Image (cartoon, rainbow, N blue to C red):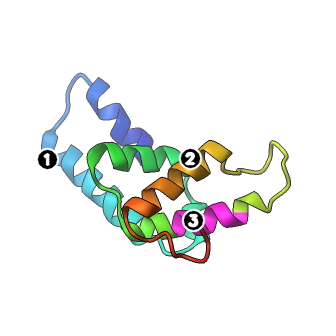
Amino acid sequence: MLDNILAFPGLEFSWQPYEDLCLQQFVDSINRFRSAEDVDQLAQPFDVLAFLQSRGLVHADFLLALCQWSLRGVHRPNVLSERRPTAKQLVLLYDHCCEWNVESTPAL
């Protein structure tokens, strides 16, 4: 869904209420994430984090779920078929967690 939202500005014809509705639905679904399995549905979880940050829509529950996904990801084998967070992404996630006062989460 994020790919569709990002494509809206490039469309020749668009309808702002539809764009707003799509964005709201996307944010609502992201804010319901509670576990690593939820975050695993996303193709690029840290791209979603960057998008939410750029719009001021980051939610603490998404950060906690992303921490769980990252914890699980760092223990996966370092092969191309596995999605894992990079060290830079982990530092960025830690900074966001400190900003949102959720740095005491066990997964971090």
**Badge 2 amino acid:** Gln
Which residue position is annotated with label 1? 17
- Residue 43 seen: no
Q: At x 57% / y 60%, what residue is drawn?
A: 41
Tell how many labels.
3
Q: Earlier in the sequence, mark 2 or mark 1?
A: 1
Looking at the picture, tell me which residue is in the foreground, 55 or 1: 55
**Mark-to-mark CA distance, 3 and 1:** 33 Å
**Which of label 3 and label 2 is nearer to you?**
3
**Badge 1 amino acid:** Pro
Instruction: Say whether marks 3 and 1 touch (CB < 8 Å).
Output: no
Q: Where residue 38 appears, x then y in whole percent?
A: 55, 68
- Quarter-wise, where is residue 30 in the image? bottom left
**Is disc 2 surrounded by few (<14), some (14 to 19) or many (20+) residues within 10 Å?**
few
Disc sitting over residue 44 in the figure: 2
Q: Against 75, is 45 above or below? A: above
Looking at the picture, tell me which residue is in the foreground, 70 or 79: 70
Q: Earlier in the sequence, mark 3 or mark 1?
A: 1
**Is disc 1 surrounded by few (<14), some (14 to 19) or many (20+) residues within 10 Å?**
few
SS label for mark 1:
helix
What are the residue bounds of the magenta stretch? Answer: 65-72
Q: At x 52% / y 49%, what residue is drawn?
A: 92
Left or right: where does residue 76 sit relative to residue 45? right
**Badge 3 amino acid:** Cys
Which residue position is annotated with label 3? 67
**Which of label 3 and label 1 is nearer to you?**
3
Q: Where residue 48 appears, x then y in whole percent?
A: 45, 48
- Residue 8 seen: yes
**Mark-to-mark CA distance, 2 and 1:** 26 Å
